[in-house]
Image: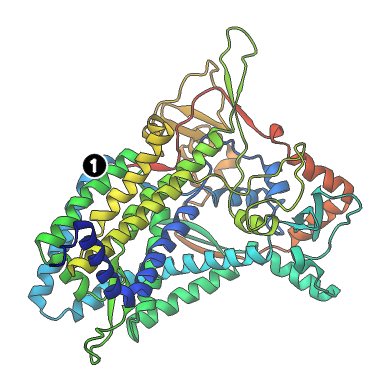
Amino acid sequence: MADAKPTLVAQILQRLAYEFAEARPMLPTYFHLISSALFPIYTGAHASLSRPSTAAKPTKKKRKALHRKGSDTEDDDESSDDDEDEEQHNMEGLSPKDAILMPLFAGIALSGLYFLLKWMNDPTLLNKILNAYFAIFGVFSVSKLVTDVLDIGHSIIFPRRHVIDGTLYHVNGKEEKAIPVVGNIKGKQLLSTPLPGFLASTPLNESLRKIVWNDRAMPANKWSLKLYLHRALAAKFKIGAHGIVGALTGLGVVAYFNFIDKPWYLTNLLGFGFSYGALQLMSPTTFATGSLILGALFFYDIYFVFYTPMMVTVAKSLDVPIKLMFPRPGDPKDPTSAPSHAMLGLGDVVLPGIVIGLALRFDLYLFYLRRQKRVPAASAEGAEAIEKAEYFPLAGRWSDHFWTHSLTGQPLWVKDDNKPEAPFTFPKTYFKASLVGYVLGLLATLGVMIIWDHAQPALLYLVPGVLGSVWLTAAVRGELSLIWNYTEAIEEKEDRKTGKDDKAVNGTKTEGSKRVTRSQSKATKDISGDGESDDESSRPRRSMRGRPEREIFSFTIEAPSSMKKSKANKKHARSSPADEIKTVANNNTPGRSTAVETGAEPSGKRQRLR
């Protein structure tokens, strides 16, 4: 009897088993590729978080009480403002016009590089020129990445909150004490050690304990650098010990990459830095714009990979950090074959990543939106007001969660409803859904590439995976209207009339769509000569920014001040430990810090459209 012919399902399963056996030696490479693609997306998306419009801005008093970072200058107004500035990200907002121009310009650049390579025959000179161009950005991007990694590592060792024997402690870097605030606090004393959790039992003498406390405060002790060039540049930035290490690492990596060798791991490090920085500098502002951008690049990628040799030729010819490389084993049938590398373009990381980052910021927006409360109107004619929950910066919250929760996410202390804690994290529904879609897109890309043995346009699979997961999640949750109307664009509009003439809004006066501070108005008046007194005429004229008009160039370096620490110690020495515990406990009450707003605020106030 003749053997029965296998069914279609059996043939498919047999083919899959064969392809899996063939691809088995490549599985470590593919796992390396997927994890490397997720690393800059995950970290860059979280680094882009800032206060959403659905959350109230925290007061200085609250920031000093709850967001201590071990800084010696936390009582200083300027330091508080700088800490708040760190949470605001000036991202470049993309518009629908950019969705049309982006693939057009990308195609022109790719075609130009392709024909230039064909004309030059040898890409050595072009590689040197492009590497010199990328070196400028490489130093800053790698420095930022390494600095933030060191900050995270430092925060794991020195969290702001930790639990010991069912007691939640808040670490006070100024007093150099850990204060029991919630849980089993009966009979608990202040701790003088800066080490958290089980590490708190480590014996430390007085001098060693002082060294560890100083090390805990080290990231916040930064040098201030100010650079001014008349009518060209006015910059101010701070750098600490971690920043110095990051800058030296960036310089070393770029120098080695350009002058000695270009190993794959340095190429990936530069690629991580570029992707990590790009996700903090660029946003599609709306999900509609993000979908339009990915949709346009979807067809761009298909055309230049399937219908022209340009994409593959340029990627293989240019030895510049515009891709991620992953070593893979040689052909087992040919032992003499040299190991090769699998490649993933940075565009396949950054472009889906900006939508994934937008999804994470939308999750944060929803988290504070659901914590808002409606306040009834005081009178029958008044409008109902919205009471926003106070925003707590998420920097360092992961390390706090690590030391205060079990592996299953359960708190290690008994919660007290009268003393609620600042949120350690928030639900990330859309972010997780978009990550799942991205991983499925990568797996589909690798699977098709294995079966057909041909380079694949990754966006062909990543775009449906990311956009499909986001919009499908919104449809299932019944939030299509909410996600469609969400925006992070800043719109220039004329200020609404409040019925109060000559009143300042947040310390500023409004004139049409411009906001002119009182100090700036006075400075403008003095410079123009209107109302100038005899005393003022004898003083050197100063610009609106307070600089002498004759100043051409200046560069100053300010070291961390030690005077502020002594002042802070004198101030806090007057309060007893019991008063400190009471203060921290009261600051945890959510109703004491929320802002009541009667007008609707834009969904996002981060990106400015050009």
Apparent side of residue 163 relative to residue 333 in the rendered image (left or right) = right
Q: Residue furthest right?
A: 187
- For disc 1, the marked residue is 97
Q: Residue, x 35% and y 87% (percent of image)?
A: 260
Q: Measuring from the top left, give residue 141's x and y in whole percent.
A: 42, 66
Q: Residue, x 20% and y 62% (percent of image)?
A: 11
Q: Measuring from the top left, give residue 87's x and y in whole percent.
A: 54, 49
Q: Quadrant of residue 126?
A: bottom left
Vertical placement of 193 versus 441: above or below?
A: below
* Element marked by disc 1: helix
Q: Measuring from the top left, give residue 356's x and y in whole percent.
A: 39, 50
Apparent side of residue 170 relative to residue 307 in the rendered image (left or right) = right
Q: Measuring from the top left, give residue 328's x and y in whole percent.
A: 31, 79
Dot 1, crowdedness within 10 Å: few (<14), some or many (≥20)?
Answer: few
Vertical placement of 81 versus 472: above or below?
A: below
Circle 1: residue type:
Lys
